[in-house]
Image (cartoon, grey):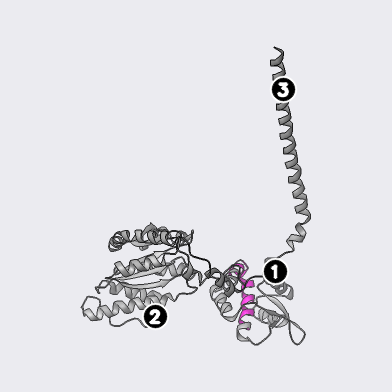
Amino acid sequence: MAPKRKNVEVEEEEVEAQDEEDEEEELAFSRNYFLAKEVGSSSGKRSAARKVSEINLVDEQLLRASLSEIPAKHEKEIGSLLESYKGLYSNWLFELRCGFGLLMYGFGSKKTLLEDFASSTLISYTVVVINGYLTSVNLKQVMTTIAEILWEHYKCKGKTSKKQHTQLPSGSKSIDEIITFIDDISDDCNCSVCLLIHDIDGPALRDPDSQQHLARVSCCSCICLVASIDHVNAPLLWDKKMVHTQFKWSCHHVPTFVPYKIEGLFNPLILSSSGHVQTTKTALVVLQSLTPNAQSVFRVLAEFQLANEKEEGMHVSELYNKCREQFLVSSQVTLNAHLTEFKDHKLVKMRRHSDGQDCLHIPLPSNALEKLLQDLA
């Protein structure tokens, strides 16, 4: 019996020793955790003083040149994947003829895929391409092009109908009037137009008005729509009516894993030093969060800067007088409060004028400032 008792006692001692080691490890972890917290809080003031604007950003051309040197990977697998999608072309064409719109989503650029589908399968359609990944798209010009295509087919056919379409809408017509013309003439011309939109959720088409115009034109009997999306929140652009009644989307998951080389050319690089587009977007978000009076004060300063590009800036006293005339501010204190907000958000910078007085300047080029005022209106 004695050896057995000794074995039990040894096992109990080993368990107790192991428990003590575990407790010591837990205590050591706890001590390190709170010590790290103390160190972090003591250095918080120093780290908080560092700003993103102090980072030395890389020149955009140099960064893009470095990106272009990255070797392509998995080209064979990507080619096989794109080849496999060709077997779906006939199904997609059938859905278009049934009145549905095609919406392609999935990781990777779908530009090559959609253009191959259009060139090889949509032979009987007149294809109009919209590159939504561009920073700006003249949607009115696109609608005018579609109207001109339909008008040419209508004249060539020489068909007489109950509705007499005497002339093509002029450039002075609104985009709504042009879409109404397209809708009216659709039934009288034997022509099918496919609107191929790369990135219908792109920056140039993301606003509600553009989406409403595209939804309206997609309802025309001779128009069909093929589009791609890349943003995860793209479906939030449309309501239930637009999805099911107007666009009539038939969604297809077609990941291609193709790099966004072409689309990326028109987007500013976050780590580059020339990001006026991104700065303009940020400024717009900030301004929209301010009061209408603050926005109007900023507009007065911006309009002065656009009208006087050679000037070093606008004197604070001159800005105050103009804002006072327009009843935007009642005192210098109110104007100073607005200017403090602008300076805190880096919307406005203070300069020393050649006459020794302080003047205000918006750190944006003229074209970016004009775009900002248009978006703010």
Read off the residue under disc 1. 54
Mark 2: which amino acid? Lys
**Mark nearer the viewer, 3 or 2:** 3
Residue at 44% across, 64% down: 109
Which residue is tagged 3? Answer: 10
Q: Nearer the viewer, residue 289 or 117?
A: 117
Can you tell which quarter of the image residue 246 is in? bottom left
Task: Report the side of 5 relative to 263 (left or right).
Answer: right
Which residue appears at 65% of the width and 73% of the height? 347
Q: Nearer the viewer, residue 345 or 330?
A: 345
In the rendered image, the quadrant that contains the C terminus is bottom right
Residue interval drawn in magenta: 283-304
N-terminal label among 3 and 1: 3
Q: Which dot marks residue 173?
A: 2
Closer to the N terminus: mark 3 or mark 2?
3
Residue 186, image x, y percentages: 28, 72
For residue 94: magenta?
no
